[in-house]
Image: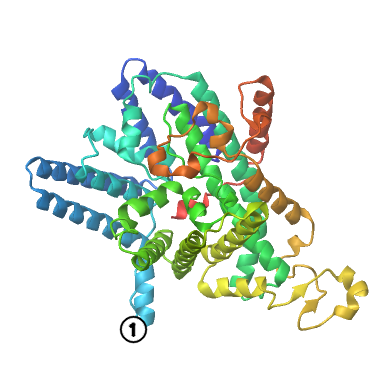
Amino acid sequence: MLFNSYTFILIFLPIVLAGYFLFGTDRRYGAMVWLTLASLIFYGWWDTRFVSLLLISVIFNYTASLSIFRSQALARMTLAKGLLALAIAVDLLLLGYYKYAYFLAENVSNLFGVGFTVQGVILPLGISFFTFTQIAYLVDTLQGKVNDRDFVHYLLFVTYFPHLIAGPVLHHKEMMPQFSSAKANLPDWTNITVGASIFVLGLAKKVLIADNLSGFATPIFDAVAAGGQPMLLESWIGALAYTMQLYFDFSAYSDMAVGISLMFNIRLPVNFNTPYKSTSIIEFWKNWHITLSRFLRDYLYIPLGGNRRGSQRRHINLMVTMLLGGLWHGANWTFVVWGALHGGYLIVNHAWRAIKQELGWGDGGRVASFFAWALTFIAVVIGWVFFRAADVGVALDMLRGMMGLNGLSLPASLQPSLSVMSDPGWLKFDGAHPLNPKLNNTDIFLNLGLALLIATQLPNVRQMFRAYQPVYEDISQLGPPLDNPHPVRTHILWAPTRKHAWLFGLIFAISLMSLNRMSEFIYFQF
């Protein structure tokens, strides 16, 4: 089921919300059972066959956690660690089969020239997210961070529908105290109002911005995949359109999940903190998919040694972490290259910071900050080209176009005035965007300009609604950037006023009327 669907907005969410509070008046445990059943229905709406897979995964990991806990209680730590390793191995094998079996079979066949294939494997929605969530739970169990061992609580923790399909990656200690709170199941009209407003903003981002930008990015990438050679303007337009589409698509899901959860009096951890304002790749990764970055840091980078064994080992650990983080996103060499790029970016960024510190250089003022932002943004755009492309060859074709190696195409109307510059090998007058005639108007420039303005100049949800604390915040885990948001003008802040009610009502009505096609969120495929 999609957040951006009439079924979810007009039927599922109101019924589940009403039932949750109806049970919660005097039967808090019943409210948890109700919300758990609703979450399973939400997940099974796409394909009921995978509900059983989800339940098997939950039962296995819950049983494993109990075994680890009992082994600890008997002071048998070697056994507990062995059970943890075994449980994680089973989780990763399950994830690997569904997500990487075809990819591995294809590469083995190509490498050894054998006809080894895997048929009929369908990727279950959200398998990466509920697998990582449960791995974190198992590790937390071994570390003594888990106190609640009720099965229904655990089942709700894993299947809780606002996060189930595309994150955030949750920690048990963040969520279960909230579900167990005496006030969790009692209607809080402030939370309902604020949550609904946040949901409306997310819906507008998805329907009015992200889906619109996909109409510019997809034709270009598809044309290049079919053998087209993108020229300078269209390749940059395609790359920038996807860059902004992915931003608003992921931001939309994150906002909608936060808003929905807040209506249930539950605060999800922040997962998105205006990353396109970042002036370094280090800052970008502190603000993009924050809970995944946290998971990779806590359960991969630090266990590998982190930065405790010198700069060279730190660089290796960073590269390994980013390579695996890239592969987590999908079974394609493009994601491996994307991870390698960001691993390289981070290594260079850390080296540059070390050089600046050694030489005693400061930040350089506003001009230096702008160029740092521009360099970071361009590096991110280049990475997204690989992230979006069907294969590495398509990504390289796009990059060749972005470097101008395929020439520049301009509208035929400009040929008389620029005829002296005409060069068949570089400048052509066969339309500004021969791969996608739709781009021969100013709409794309207005859309890209507006999207960039919103992403870099306007406050995010956490800032706009900061007086109501819409997200779960643990500064010690999430890092300083979340504790020091960019300045926000007072008139942009949300308030329970008639003016905001009319404004958000209008945005909601326009978004509903724009639901003329159902489009999945990009992160659903991960």
The answer to whether residue 177 is seen in the rendering is: yes
In the picture provided, is 215 more to the left or to the right than 78?
Answer: right
Q: Residue furthest top?
A: 26
In the picture provided, is 419 more to the left or to the right than 240?
Answer: right
Task: Work out whether residue 277 or residue 230 is closer to the camera in this orientation and state it.
Answer: 277
Give the residue drawn at x 73%, y 56%.
444
Say which quarter of the image contains residue 302: bottom left
Give the residue drawn at x 32%, y 57%.
300
Give the residue drawn at x 72%, y 51%.
449
Question: How many residues crowd around disc 1 within 10 Å: few (fewer than 14), some, or many (20 or more)?
Answer: few
Q: Residue 182 in the image: x percent, y percent?
A: 33, 19
The answer to whether residue 271 is seen in the rendering is: no
Report the amino acid beneath label 1. Answer: Phe
Q: In the displayed structure, would residue 171 be above or below residue 415?
A: above
Q: How many marks?
A: 1
Say which quarter of the image contains residue 31: top left
The way the protein has been coloured in the rendering is rainbow
Q: Residue 391 in the image: x percent, y percent?
A: 51, 71
Check the picture and name the quadrant holding the C terminus. Answer: bottom left
Q: Residue furthest right?
A: 416
Q: In the displayed structure, would residue 463 be above or below residue 377?
A: above
Q: Residue 247 in the image: x percent, y percent?
A: 57, 51
Q: Which residue is mark 1?
A: 112
Q: In the displayed structure, would residue 148 be above or below residue 370?
A: above
Q: Residue furthest front?
A: 360
Give the residue drawn at x 51%, y 26%.
468
Task: Work out whether residue 84 or residue 34 is closer to the camera in this orientation and state it.
Answer: 84
Q: Residue 469 in the image: x percent, y percent?
A: 49, 29
Q: Secondary structure at mark 1?
A: helix
